[in-house]
Image (cartoon, rainbow, N blue to C red):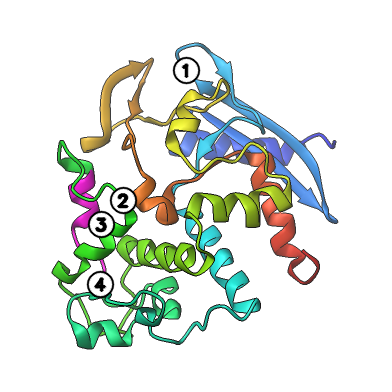
């Protein structure tokens, strides 16, 4: 393993200072292998536990790239047509209305061009005491209540609900839960042994990294302070929105994912 150069260390320190970040994990790749792995600062400010390349962090919307990989694997296997109506794979689907539904394709879902944008369904799972959409099936069934922000294909409009729908297509075509699809088709083949698809596994991990905010945390504040930071509280059960942001991983495992992406033809 190589040692960070002075300039690399300086860049990391500058990033941490300018963004008020208490800890980072670093894993660098070159020529098909990991050449540096380590951490700077703390993964847990309360205990002082150091951040490292195997510390487990929620990766938020980087998860969406994993969903796209699963979809493209199906395309390569001839099991999915990116431009076919999504309703071909989910009979009975209604999103907004029949005309909108007929124009929805996996390509539109993955490129945020469904016109749906923020439908409000995700906000309800975060804000209501009882999750009104405890399963992906329940959320997809409720998308007939969505209001489109734009015509399908009209413009880019970031949509987590669109990615839930994409995940539902994937697990329907594979005939197995999305958690199993991720494990069997990405995590295991790449040796991502520390990567998990449930926040409960992240919370139970002995080397998990806590999420912190200095200020302006809003509704995600836990009220627990570790020094100058408040602990960010994630939704307890995020499985409905797994395909949008439910993976937790490590710097080393993401480096393995990066290596496979860089060597796509042979991976």
- Residue range (magenta): 117-125
Q: Which numbered circle lies on residue 45?
A: 1
Left/right placement of residue 121 relative to residue 161 reads left
Q: Nearer the viewer, residue 197 or 22?
A: 197
Residue depicted at x 49% and y 82%: 82
Please identify the quarter of the rendering in which residue 20 is found: top left
Location of residue 237 in the rendering, given as x and y in whole percent from the top left corner = 34, 38
Q: Quadrant of the C terminus?
A: bottom right
Left/right placement of residue 65 relative to residue 28 reads left
Q: Are the residues tagged 3 and 1 within 8 Å (C-beta)?
A: no
- As measured in the structure, the alpha-carbon distance from the residue carrying label 4 to the one carrying label 1 is 39 Å
Q: Which one is earlier in the sequence, the residue at label 2 or at label 4?
A: 4
Residue depicted at x 78% and y 39%: 36
Q: Secondary structure at mark 1?
A: loop
Q: Which residue is mark 2?
A: 135
- As measured in the structure, the alpha-carbon distance from the residue carrying label 3 to the one carrying label 4 is 18 Å
Q: Are the residues tagged 3 and 2 within 8 Å (C-beta)?
A: yes
Q: Nearer the viewer, residue 41 or 82?
A: 82
Location of residue 33 in the rendering, given as x and y in whole percent from the top left corner = 83, 49
- As measured in the structure, the alpha-carbon distance from the residue carrying label 1 to the one carrying label 2 is 34 Å
Q: Which residue is mark 3?
A: 138
Q: Which residue is mark 4?
A: 116
Q: Which one is earlier in the sequence, the residue at label 1 or at label 2?
A: 1
Q: Which one is earlier in the sequence, the residue at label 4 or at label 1?
A: 1
Around disc 3, counting alpha carbons within 10 Å, would you say few (fewer than 14), some (14 to 19), or many (20 or more)?
few
Q: Which one is earlier in the sequence, the residue at label 3 or at label 4?
A: 4
Q: Is residue 63 above or below residue 202?
A: below
- As measured in the structure, the alpha-carbon distance from the residue carrying label 3 to the one carrying label 1 is 38 Å
Which mark's residue is nearer the viewer, 4 or 1? 4
Around disc 1, counting alpha carbons within 10 Å, would you say few (fewer than 14), some (14 to 19), or many (20 or more)?
many
Location of residue 21 in the rendering, given as x and y in whole percent from the top left corner = 47, 32
Q: Which one is earlier in the sequence, the residue at label 3 or at label 1?
A: 1
């Amino acid at each position: 393993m190589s040692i960070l150069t002075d300039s690399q260390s300086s860049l990391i320190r500058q990033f941490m200072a300018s963004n008020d970040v208490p800890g980072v994990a670093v894993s660098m790749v070159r020529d098909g292998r990991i050449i540096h792995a380590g951490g700077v600062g703390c993964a847990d400010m309360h205990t002082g536990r150091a951040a490292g390349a195997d510390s487990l962090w929620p990766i938020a919307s980087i998860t969406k790239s994993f969903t796209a990989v699963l979809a493209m694997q199906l395309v390569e296997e001839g099991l999915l047509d990116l431009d076919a109506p999504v309703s071909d794979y989910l009979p009975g689907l209604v999103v907004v209305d029949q005309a909108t539904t007929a124009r929805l394709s996996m390509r539109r879902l993955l490129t945020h061009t469904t016109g749906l944008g923020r439908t409000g369904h995700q906000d309800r799972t975060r804000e209501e005491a009882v999750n009104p959409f405890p399963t992906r099936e329940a959320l997809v069934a409720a998308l007939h209540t969505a209001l489109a922000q734009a015509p399908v294909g009209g413009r880019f409009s970031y949509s987590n609900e669109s990615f839930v729908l994409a995940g539902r297509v994937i697990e329907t075509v594979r005939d197995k839960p999305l958690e199993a699809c991720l494990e069997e088709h990405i995590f295991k083949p790449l040796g991502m042994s520390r990567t998990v698809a449930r926040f409960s596994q992240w919370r139970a991990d002995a080397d998990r990294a806590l999420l912190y905010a200095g200020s302006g945390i809003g509704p995600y504040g836990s009220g627990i302070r570790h020094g100058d930071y408040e602990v960010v509280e994630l939704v307890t059960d995020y499985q409905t929105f797994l395909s949008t942001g439910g993976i937790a991983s490590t710097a080393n495992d993401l480096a393995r994912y990066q290596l496979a992406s860089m060597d796509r033809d042979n991976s």
